[in-house]
Amino acid sequence: MALPADVIVQILLRERLRVTTLAAAIARDGHVADDIFQQVVLAALENGSHFKGHDHVLPWALRAARHRALDYAKSKQLRPFPDEVLDLLEAPAEGDSPWSDQGEALHHCLNRLTSSARTLLQLKYGEGLTAAAIAARLNRTADAVYQSLSRIHKLLRECVQTRLGLAPTAANAGREGEG
Amino acid sequence: MKSHLASIDELFVRYWDGTLSPEQQDQLADLLASAPAARAQFQLLCHQALAAAELPAWQEPIGSLSAIANQPLVPATPGCPPSPSGWSRRRVLGWVGGGLAAGIAGVAAYRWWGSEAGDPLRLQHVRGTVHLRDSRGRTRSVEKPLPPNATVATIGLESTATLAYPDGTRITLNGDSVILLRGSTRWLHLTQGVVSAVVLPQPLAAAPLVLSTPQVVLPGLSGVALSLGEVARATEVGVHQGVIQAQRPNGDALADFRPGELHVVHADGRHTKEPLPTTPTDYRRDFAEPLPEDWSVGIREWWETDFVVRPEWWPDPYHNFTVMHQIRSDKQWNRGFFTLYPTSEIHVRYWIDRPGAGQLCVCVRTSRTVSSPTGVLEVNDAFVDARSREWQWLKVRAANMLANKEAPRFRDPWVAFLLVFNTYEEDLGLKVAEIRVVGPRPAD
């Protein structure tokens, strides 16, 4: 029996972050990942009669997103990871925190960054500028931009882990407690 | 393992940028293949990038950004409340998840947005000059949810903004476009320009989502992808997915708009339908025929042996309303004028009284009309070396028009939808008689 469209949409919306994260990991562009998710939803609705059950939808969507992202990466001449790595990224990790919890923690942590750090993230991932382009705007070297971005990512990771109670660090634990 | 994890942030940043060496990418792949913790971190980094892509666009002038690299990248002090503007469609979808689709959107959204609940509609991917005004004409922050009766205007060739609903539905304004939220955030009325829409299937209980123009109403949109443009007292609707039961503004049924169709509804009621056109790679335009009704800037006149178009004074909003001498074509978002590849050549036959600074700009999109990014191919100093007072050809390859800050960030093919000649504040006596595009040939 075919799955009703609203059930397919429910499943895909619930798993949206997982699908877009896989697409982003391959395409290296958040906006493209978002586009791919939209395409996958529409394609899923077109192919709804092929789904045999609820459990079929997410694996299908992940694979569809992966193929679309690989097509995009190819068009951009981006070298993809080997299939075995993509298989692992596509599969759920053991002991994963729920994506929703991770998302909420990340939102909290993004709000705690300085405006300059947020701006740098926005230029990189929102505007899609390369580190070299950002460096040219800031009159810095690309390496300095890479280092700054790396530091921001590290701060965010530590903050998220602390928030989720996975690996509290002294530096962030106090702030989180106050927050 | 710890040393691996210590370096994964920088590996990731360089990976995202495409600047890892093959050896470094192999190192990253090995790490991901061998260490579940590294994979979890990599996925969190991707998640961070996705969330960062949704941060509000930076507003500071470029000059002030030089401070960024030297500022400490520490979390804000606990006393600073989290920004209420941080929520985005992607985040909400990720965290509220299927509850929205299941019909509990109101409850969940109220939890997150508080008094802004209802049907929170937000602007995303804001680029260029974008104005948001409320029903009383007051400017509002583009970071806040859009109130009913708000007006959103994107001003300038490169300006875009996406109206994003929590369910993933999005409506994107491109270039000089204005949209009005009529009464609620579920009725969007386009008064100028072009929008593209990807509308996810709507729950039965949801209020109908409506797109309209002065000529046509598209009610109850659900599971459709379309582009909608206002052209010369007419509306063009290109349908890429789904079926739309179009109505006239008085509520009378008009027709079913189906995938692959381009419908034109005129102000006088005429309605035509054709297959969605393929934009040609070769193109020729002279000005023997009158300019189209929605030609934007420039005057057609007889000059010596030909009809030409010459610039007009025009207060350019993209240059702080400085009066400039420009020719600006009509905008052909749906149809496109021509498709460019790097080896395509643009030829312009022109006359100029005296050489000087000037440019040719070709605004382009991708080959899809829905949710397409845009960019500009430019020839700057196009007339610096021109010969005075004689007909001549400007010839340039598309690949040589990419050295500018507005260049497309997407690969070819590029579909041209707007042409601009600009001699800035100087009247150089420019006359344009003919524009040709020669697409790639087998030898290319």
Image (cartoon, rainbow, N blue to C red):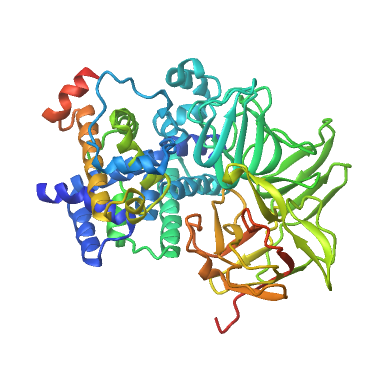
Residue lying furthest top: B115
Horizontal and vertical percent for residue A74?
Answer: 42, 64
* A126, B198: nearer the viewer: A126
Location of residue A67 with respect to B437 vertically, above or below: above
Horizontal and vertical percent for residue B13?
Answer: 28, 51
Horizontal and vertical percent for residue B428?
Answer: 67, 62
Location of residue B139 with respect to B416 vertically, above or below: above
Question: Which of the image's four quarters has the C terminus of chain B?
Answer: bottom right
Q: Is residue B47 visible?
A: no
Q: Is residue B104 visible?
A: yes
Location of residue B119 with respect to A103 vertically, above or below: above
**Left or right, residue A177 beside residue B225:** left
Residue lying furthest bottom: B443
Residue B154 quadrant: top right
Location of residue B360 with respect to B193 vertically, above or below: below
* B324, A113: nearer the viewer: B324
Which residue is drawn at the image coordinates 69% and 48% (left, top)? B314
Which residue is drawn at the image coordinates 75% and 39% (left, top)? B245
Which residue is drawn at the image coordinates 68% and 55% (left, top)? B326
**Left or right, residue B28 beside residue B253:** left
**Left or right, residue B276 beside residue A69:** right
Horizontal and vertical percent for residue B179?
Answer: 66, 35
**Left or right, residue B252 beside residue B366:** right
Residue B359 quadrant: bottom right
